[in-house]
Image (cartoon, coloured by chain):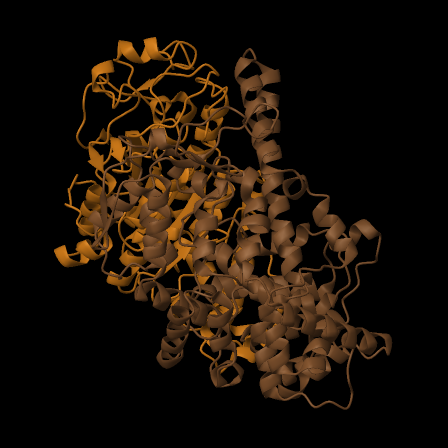
């Protein structure tokens, strides 16, 4: 969504006011201001946890205006050191067309090499570089989750990455995962749902992952068509049929990835009439099935690329789509079984606003339930880790992001690591088995002890972070359960204290 | 460590943690009920160099550098004849062949799934879900469904993350990797404090079980490790599968009845090797591990079944890199002290070029869902409805393996 001129102006004025507050050294805490339990609950759910900058902003603006600011979607700012780290990743900084061209070139060289050790070594190097690109994409995403200036937007980027999940280790997805996060999902994270669907549909990562690149007239591949309905828009029980899947697959024939030119520049060859080229997306009419189709009872005339636009309009305007997406958002943010009336209200907003994500979120975040302390949700590993890092780092830049990705792998939720297209589970119950609890305690100890590699590159000593901070005392301490208080009182060392806090139900339930 | 000593250790472990509330399932495994370990070879192992179709001239034509020689008593690198058609990779001479002679191992060639994607992840996923075709629930594994239709069969995955096979169970299925020595990070006092925070919450059992499992496993293994060091008069090999399976046996013997473990490193596209080389050393490691498992279980091996599967077989012909590419049908293994082994079971077809699927790889004549529905039916006396819950729409085929 593009913010209106007035909201931009308002945002600037607010930034200016906040700068004054910063200048007065009042970022850490405004001692006089009272923070209620509802404030903290709301902030922990809306943000990726709480750090001092988020808290200061919330207190400066109040909940309603802070929500306006979050939903306006600006402010992808990061601490300069973190931005520099992300910029240093070739996965992020190299245009995807160039990455694809390089990869293809190396594959061709490899094929031409005679069998032997040199070929084996070249093959291994190619695989290693591919894994490295995925690692960079993971680290970029995790750094943004931990440091992003708009934590609600960061949660939505993560939510959509998972809703439109791609698996980083499949084929060329490894080259495209970072592009997918930065340039496909992020610009639409708070925009219109329909635009987001179109962006993912045309993204090289999705075209590769769900095989629509292979979908052509006479050689139909239904993989993407099925998931576009089942996982991305309507949900499995929405009443569509196998016939609808087949028809949608025909509509999508010819939508694929443009072959990279050897030098990585856009291919200048003449394209047939009706071809559509956008970045790496290519609609090739020669591969398209031009028959007339019927989708969800609606006739779609065989006309080429326009069929895809019509089909996505049709899918995203179904009441089932509004309900499905609203239910998932409420489940992610609020509760494994969100209140049906709230989901209905969100679905109504979705339909009335033609799928305006920010407005649907406003219905959710402005609801009384969102600040209520009664419903509790066990945080998935991503929300746990982001909150733990926001509390313990509080804006201090790490020197090495690798531990973040390692912890996510240990906790079983690595970004771009979900093999199946359904994304990681949204419900808390999927993350709280006995083995997973033991893992979470381990990671709590790895963070709480400071015995990790976050700052090794800086040469900083591996000391426990000071979690018993003013930030903690203002946001979490007043409402800790007696059991957690008792545990913290038994801690013999700072690292033990940190571990218990991060392992506690108070920290792990949102 | 004998059984009595084990129980004493377990009791000590329990007594040492008075403040932890063990839920009953950690120590509940009824005596005498069958024990199943599911071994998943991830990467698609080359079954044609495990179970060598030595009677097929086509095999030798198709694999000029990779083929394993016809059985020859004077050649230690030749296949070991199992019958008139099939030979065993000689890397398994000291591990699996003795079990074969005791009729404690059977092979099921032309086994696998309907999934023809030849993609590792799609096919592994398809097998672990155990549901027909592409349809069904992405988060429901067949071992999870098996464990819900059974009672008194405690389940565990010996993996870092809960595998899809075990996902979707309404009951908690613990997981712990025994590849390394799983040291408990928290001592008794810390474990009690951590578990104490969750007392009275819905996660009380999960929190205390997770901690208790780590601690009791690390104690059991400490004893086992000492015993292994004594037995081998030195340190046991750190990275071998046998070290891992001896640890697994220590848990499966008394506490668990349904287990899962996976082994990687089978995707041999390049320089696969023949009787010696990459694949054969992997097979040797696997065979040694399975033999060690049988040995470590002692008497309990008699009511144990081990199933070894992989997502697919590989191309019947070797490729230009002295390796093999993704294929389809594979060979599954079934082992156990009292199984009906010493035979190559299931439907078969002569190994020749015309019988290849798409002129490329083994066809699947024994769908694993049908075969394991038959096996589970025999092992636990499951009825039709229960088997349909485990493998929807399967047509159970009883190969009389157990």
Give the residue furthest to the right.
A24
Give the answer, above or below, for where B347 lies relative to A477: above
Query: In which quadrant of the rendered view does residue A144 lie?
Result: bottom right
Query: In which quadrant of the rendered view does residue B275 lie?
Result: top left
Q: In this image, B368 relative to B242: left or right?
A: left
Q: In this image, A115 relative to B283: left or right?
A: right
Foreground pick, A343 / B63: A343
Residue B226 visible in image: no
Residue B330, image x, y percentages = 31, 30
Q: In this image, A214 relative to B192: left or right?
A: left
Q: Quadrant of the C terminus of chain B?
A: top left
Residue A205, image x, y percentages = 49, 42
- Identify the hue of chain A: brown
Give the answer, above or below, for where B21 lies relative to B99: below
Residue A9, image x, y percentages = 69, 71
Q: In this image, A390 relative to B219: left or right?
A: right
Residue A470 visible in image: yes
Q: Residue at x 30, y 55 (%)?
A: B137
The mark tally for this picture is 0
Residue B121, image x, y percentages = 41, 41
Q: Residue at x 68, y 81 (%)?
A: A61
Foreground pick, A230 / A491: A230
- Identify the hue of chain B: orange
């Amino acid at each position: 969504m593009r913010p209106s001129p007035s909201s931009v102006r308002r945002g600037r004025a607010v930034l200016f006011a906040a700068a004054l507050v910063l200048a007065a050294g009042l970022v850490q805490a405004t001692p006089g201001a009272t923070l209620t339990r509802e404030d903290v609950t709301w902030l922990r759910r809306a943000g990726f946890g709480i750090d001092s900058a988020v808290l200061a902003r919330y207190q400066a603006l109040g909940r309603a205006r802070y929500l306006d600011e979050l939903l306006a979607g600006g402010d992808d700012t990061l601490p300069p050191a973190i931005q520099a780290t992300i910029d240093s990743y070739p996965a992020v900084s190299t245009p995807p067309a160039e990455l694809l061209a390089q990869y293809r070139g190396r594959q061709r060289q490899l094929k031409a090499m005679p069998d032997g050790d040199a070929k084996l070594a070249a093959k291994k190097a190619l695989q290693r570089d591919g894994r490295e690109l995925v690692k960079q994409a993971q680290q970029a995403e995790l750094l943004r989750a931990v440091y992003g200036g708009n934590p609600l937007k960061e949660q939505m980027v993560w939510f959509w990455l998972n809703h439109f999940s791609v698996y980083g280790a499949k084929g060329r997805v490894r080259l495209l995962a970072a592009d997918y996060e930065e340039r496909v999902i992020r610009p639409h994270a708070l925009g219109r749902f329909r635009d987001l669907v179109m962006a993912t549909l045309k993204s090289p990562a999705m075209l590769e992952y769900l095989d629509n690149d292979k979908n052509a007239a006479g050689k139909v591949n239904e993989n993407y068509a099925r998931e576009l309905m089942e996982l991305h828009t309507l949900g499995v029980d929405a009443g569509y049929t196998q016939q609808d899947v087949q028809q949608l697959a025909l509509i999508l024939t010819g939508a694929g990835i443009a072959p990279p030119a050897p030098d990585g520049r856009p291919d200048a060859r003449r394209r047939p009439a009706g071809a559509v080229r956008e970045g790496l997306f290519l609609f090739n009419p020669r591969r398209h099935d031009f028959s007339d189709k019927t989708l969800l009872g609606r006739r779609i005339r065989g006309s080429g690329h326009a069929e895809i636009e019509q089909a996505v309009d049709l899918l995203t305007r179904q009441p089932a789509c509004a309900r499905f997406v609203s239910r998932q958002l409420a489940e992610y943010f609020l509760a494994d079984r969100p209140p049906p009336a709230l989901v209905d209200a969100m679905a109504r907003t979705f339909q009335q606003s033609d799928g305006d994500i920010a407005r649907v979120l406003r219905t959710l975040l402005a609801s009384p339930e969102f600040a209520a302390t009664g419903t509790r949700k066990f945080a998935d590993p991503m929300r746990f880790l982001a909150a733990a890092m926001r509390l313990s780092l509080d804006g201090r830049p790490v020197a090495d992001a690798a531990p973040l990705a390692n912890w996510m792998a240990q906790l079983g939720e690595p970004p771009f690591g979900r093999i199946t297209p359904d994304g990681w589970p949204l419900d808390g119950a999927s993350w709280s088995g006995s083995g997973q609890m033991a893992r979470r305690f381990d990671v709590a100890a790895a963070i709480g002890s400071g015995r990790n590699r976050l700052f090794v590159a800086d040469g900083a000593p591996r000391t426990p972070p000071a979690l018993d901070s003013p930030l903690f005392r203002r946001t979490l301490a007043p409402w800790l359960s007696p059991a957690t208080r008792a545990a913290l009182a038994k801690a013999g060392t700072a690292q033990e204290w940190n571990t218990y806090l991060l392992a506690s139900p108070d920290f792990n339930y949102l | 460590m004998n059984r009595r000593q084990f129980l004493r250790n377990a009791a000590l472990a329990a007594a040492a943690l008075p403040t932890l509330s063990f839920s009953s399932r950690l120590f509940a495994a009824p005596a005498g009920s069958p024990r199943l370990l599911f071994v998943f070879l991830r990467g698609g192992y080359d079954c044609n160099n495990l179970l060598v179709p030595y009677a097929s001239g086509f095999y030798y034509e198709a694999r000029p550098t990779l083929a394993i020689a016809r059985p020859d008593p004077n050649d230690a690198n030749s296949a070991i004849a199992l019958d008139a058609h099939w030979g065993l990779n000689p890397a398994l001479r000291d591990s699996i062949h003795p079990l074969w002679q005791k009729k404690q191992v059977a092979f099921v060639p032309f086994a696998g799934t309907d999934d023809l994607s030849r993609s590792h992840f799609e096919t592994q996923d398809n097998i672990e879900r155990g549901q027909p075709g592409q349809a069904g629930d992405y988060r429901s594994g067949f071992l999870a469904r098996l464990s819900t239709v059974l009672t008194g069969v405690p389940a565990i995955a010996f993996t870092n993350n809960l595998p899809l096979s075990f996902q979707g169970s309404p009951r908690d299925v613990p997981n712990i990797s025994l590849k390394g020595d799983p040291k408990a990070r928290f001592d008794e006092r810390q474990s009690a404090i951590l578990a104490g925070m969750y007392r009275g919450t819905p996660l009380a059992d999960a929190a205390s079980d997770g901690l208790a499992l780590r601690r009791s496993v690390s104690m059991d293994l400490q004893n086992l490790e000492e015993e292994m060091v004594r037995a081998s008069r030195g340190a046991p090999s750190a990275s071998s599968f046998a070290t891992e399976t001896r640890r697994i046996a220590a848990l499966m013997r008394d506490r668990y009845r349904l287990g899962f473990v996976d082994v990687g490193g089978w995707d041999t596209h390049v320089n696969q090797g023949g009787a010696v080389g990459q694949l054969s050393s992997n097979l040797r490691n696997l065979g040694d591990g399975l033999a060690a498992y049988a040995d470590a279980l002692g008497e309990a091996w008699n009511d144990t079944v081990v199933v070894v599967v992989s997502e697919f077989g590989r191309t019947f012909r070797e490729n230009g890199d002295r390796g093999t590419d993704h294929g389809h049908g594979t060979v599954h293994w079934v082992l156990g002290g009292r199984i009906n082994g010493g035979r190559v079971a299931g439907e078969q077809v002569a190994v020749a070029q015309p019988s290849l699927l798409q002129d490329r790889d083994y066809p699947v004549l024994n769908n694993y869902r049908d075969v394991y529905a038959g096996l589970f039916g025999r092992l636990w006396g499951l009825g039709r409805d229960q088997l349909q819950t485990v493998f929807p729409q399967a047509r159970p085929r009883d190969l009389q393996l157990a």
